[in-house]
């Protein structure tokens, strides 16, 4: 028994037994697919540099956490929490964001459209409120359309930095809009409202509708 545990510890230390690492998800379309709304240059940097960095730093933080847990080092575990929140949030948020976008035009399915009309009076009203909230974010963050499973209502809210919607608010993320400057500055400069207005032309409502259904909303 002890021998097995010792071997397992050795293998773990040497990385032979490793937890699955997080990996950068592939985009479901080419970097240039979302032009002219989002340029290939922005997409390439955003995906292969920014998102990749969140993934790498999440893996590093989790390795350190694992080591701290193994040592019973609670101080280090607590000190790692912000890095896990930031990089884990960045990974979760961007994984949703890429799927939320598409070069093909689409509409919410019947169930989601009905819910939007019930909770916001109309699709245009939802879009207006989501846009206004997202544009008004101070500094870097995300605008969200989420689903409140307890109240059975769609909700619009915003999160600062890379704070992930579900862990932060309990809402299930349906549609996220990244308003970090890296998401638009090369193309839209400081004019965030133009970027937010334009992004509605490339929303993958099939994906948003599927997330609504998955959340138990439909
Ligand atoms: Mn981003």
Image: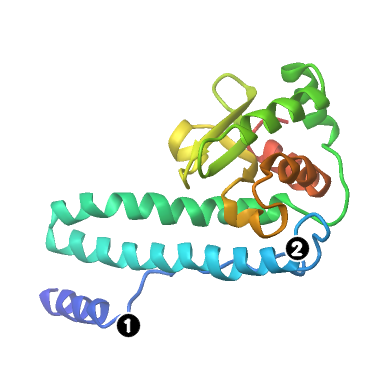
Residue 145 % position (x, y): 65, 33
Q: Residues within 10 Å of mark 2 (few under 14, many from 20)?
A: some
Residue 110 at x, y percent in the picture: 85, 31
Can you name the residue that lies furthest to the front here? Answer: 190
Residue visible at 49% across and 54% down in the picture: 90
* Near-viewer residue (207 or 135): 135
The residue depicted at 15 percent of the width and 52 percent of the height is: 74
> Is residue 163 depicted above or below 149 in this figure?
below
Relative to 170, is 30 above or below?
A: below
Q: Which residue is at the front of the view, 92 or 111?
A: 92
Q: How many labels were placed on the picture?
A: 2
Q: Position of residue 2 (x, y in %)?
A: 11, 74
**Residue beneath disc 2:** 39
Looking at the rendered structure, the secondary structure element under dot 2 is: loop
Q: Is residue 146 visible?
A: no
- Image quadrant in which the N terminus is located: bottom left
Mark 2 C-beta to ligand 1 under 8 Å = no
Classed neighbour count for the residue bearing mark 1: other residues with Cα under 10 Å, few (<14), some (14–19), many (≥20): few
Residue plotted at (53% across, 43% down): 141
Q: Is mark 1 within 8 Å of ligand 1?
A: no
Say which residue label 1 marks: 16
Q: Is residue 90 above or below residue 135?
A: below
**Which SS class for mark 1?**
loop
Q: Which mark is residue 190?
A: none
Question: In the rendered view of the protein, which quadrant contains the C terminus?
Answer: top right
Image quadrant where residue 131 sits: top right
Which residue is pictured at 47% across the width and 31% down the height?
169
């Amino acid at each position: 028994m002890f021998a097995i545990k010792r071997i397992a510890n050795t293998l773990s230390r040497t990385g032979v037994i490793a937890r699955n690492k997080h990996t950068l998800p592939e985009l479901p379309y080419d970097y240039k697919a979302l032009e002219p709304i989002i340029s290939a240059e922005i997409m390439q940097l955003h995906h292969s540099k920014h998102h990749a960095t969140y993934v790498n730093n999440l893996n590093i933080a989790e390795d350190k956490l694992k080591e701290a847990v193994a040592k019973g080092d609670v101080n280090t575990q607590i000190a790692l929490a912000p890095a896990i929140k930031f990089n884990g949030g960045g990974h979760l948020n961007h994984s949703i964001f890429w799927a939320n976008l598409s070069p093909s035009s689409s509409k919410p399915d019947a169930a989601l459209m009905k819910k939007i009309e019930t909770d916001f009076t109309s699709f245009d009203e939802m879009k207006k409120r989501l846009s206004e909230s997202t544009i008004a974010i101070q500094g870097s963050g995300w605008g969200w359309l989420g689903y409140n499973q307890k109240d059975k209502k769609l909700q619009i809210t915003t999160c600062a930095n890379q704070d992930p919607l579900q862990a932060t608010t309990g809402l299930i993320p349906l549609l996220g809009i990244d308003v970090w400057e890296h998401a638009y500055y090369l193309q839209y400069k400081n004019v965030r409202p133009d970027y937010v207005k334009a992004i509605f032309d490339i929303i993958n409502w099939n994906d948003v509708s599927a997330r609504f259904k998955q959340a138990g909303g439909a």
